Image (spheres, coloured by chain):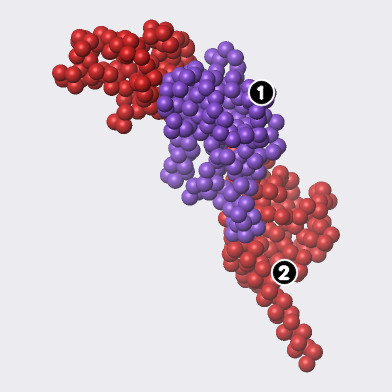
Amino acid sequence: MSDTNLKIGYVITTSTKLGYLGAILVSDEKGFPLEFQYTDPILPTKLQKVLYGNSLEKYLKVDVILDNLLGVLSNKVDLLMVKDEQLLEYNKLKTDMVRIAQTSINDGKNSAEIEKIKDDEYIFQYSKTSVPVRITFKQNVSEQNELFEKVSNIVKQMGNYIDITEPLERVQKSIEIIIAKDNE
Amino acid sequence: MFKFFMKFFLSLYHEILSFFVEFDVGVYAFKASKVNAKELNGFKFDNNVNTNKIETPKFTISTTKIKSPMIITNKTPSLVDALVIRNFTEELFKLIKIRNSQMSFLCIPRKYDVYLNTALITSSESLIFEAKVQKISKKEIHISHNLKTIEELIELSPYTKKFPITKVLQIPITKYPIKREKFSEEQLELMRTKLAIQAKCKKYSMSIENIYDKFPVGLYDEIKLEKDTSVSCTLYKHPDIGELQLLLTGKRKYDTHTTKAFIKYSEIGL
């Protein structure tokens, strides 16, 4: 169904009463789902809590859950969009990854306006009618950077059809369904 | 006197070890003398084996040490009722898996004496440790001759599962209204006209309630207005995506009847 075969991975990792778990949705640029993988909850033991201390959450989310999710994907994604900034610390990734979040700004700015917030963070107004999104990169990037241009183009292309943060909501809802099913 | 001190120190030594074993797994342990087949959930020990000289010629001897609790991946579906034992020169490492996809046992003997800690991994793959055996005598160890290797991960590792795309398609997509300030008066007039045609009333009798963007023709199904001004919809299984549209909701002023209508981007010059 896709004209460009663009594949975007949306990742959420979360902590529930069942343990830590994560899910990834691969969609095309119109938000149509192509693949969905999730992990079973991991409940760290007392020993692991002691051993990893404050870094337990990061270890589980990044090194365990994200690493496993990416390892089982059958689709090669062009860009990973994550909800949790902690996931940007994943360093084995060959695919580009950004954190994406909706802003509360809704002032009707012109289309495709980009505002630099920090060296690694920008606000994209990707279409005239959309609410701007905040995009955080793994590292500092300039507007002339190749990665910046790639992300900018993808966001603009997808933004014509969907609210680009919406698939993350779908992943979240899917996780809730999975948890509810596990609780049955 | 010497014997007394030796006995005392040995006792202390075991107490300390017991403490660490308990701390390690965070649960209870009990002495080997109490161990029998029943207490090991049906697992039978054979006294034909001398634990000091466990011979496992079919297995690769590895010096891998357990750094963290382990999950056994279930990639070998036909696990036998076998006890898999590996004999290390310095450290005895044992892995027991029972033919039951719901349950597996992990034994981590220590260098001192033969201490066993058993980890129970349930079907939900949570690492729930239940130390069943702290100490066991040589006579009570049994090794099945029907051994098979299983894959193991030294690090904590979750199972990953596929969620069917058909189920993902059933998950409602929520869309929220956008601000009407984004549109000119002329555009809003055209929208009101569209709603009025749909509601079969005059344009001035129609008021625009909400505007939702990005509703391409042929992408969304089951579009429903929610109480909180959002709209929920699902994706078509086989979408045939066409031109982009806005979804409009409006009310007839005289009877507050709610109407929805679509207007193509091209119709209002977007």
| Residue A80 seen by the camera | yes
Residue hosting label 1? A144
Seen from this angle, which residue lies furthest bottom?
Answer: B1
Chain of the residue under the numbered disc 1 shown in the image: A
Numbered badge on residue B124: none
Q: Which chain is red?
A: B
Quadrant for residue A39, please give it.
top right
Numbered disc total: 2
Rate crowding at label 2 as few (under 14), some (14 to 19) or many (20 or more) other CA atoms within 10 Å: some
Residue B7 as seen in the image, left or right of residue A184 = right
Chain of the residue under the numbered disc 2 shown in the image: B
Residue hosting label 2? B137
The hue of chain A in the figure is purple
Quadrant for residue B233, please give it.
top left
Q: In which quarter of the image is the N terminus of chain B?
A: bottom right
Q: What residue type is labelled 2?
A: Ser
| Residue A97 locus on image (x, y percent) | 63, 32
| Residue in the foreground of this view, choosing between A72 and B139 | A72
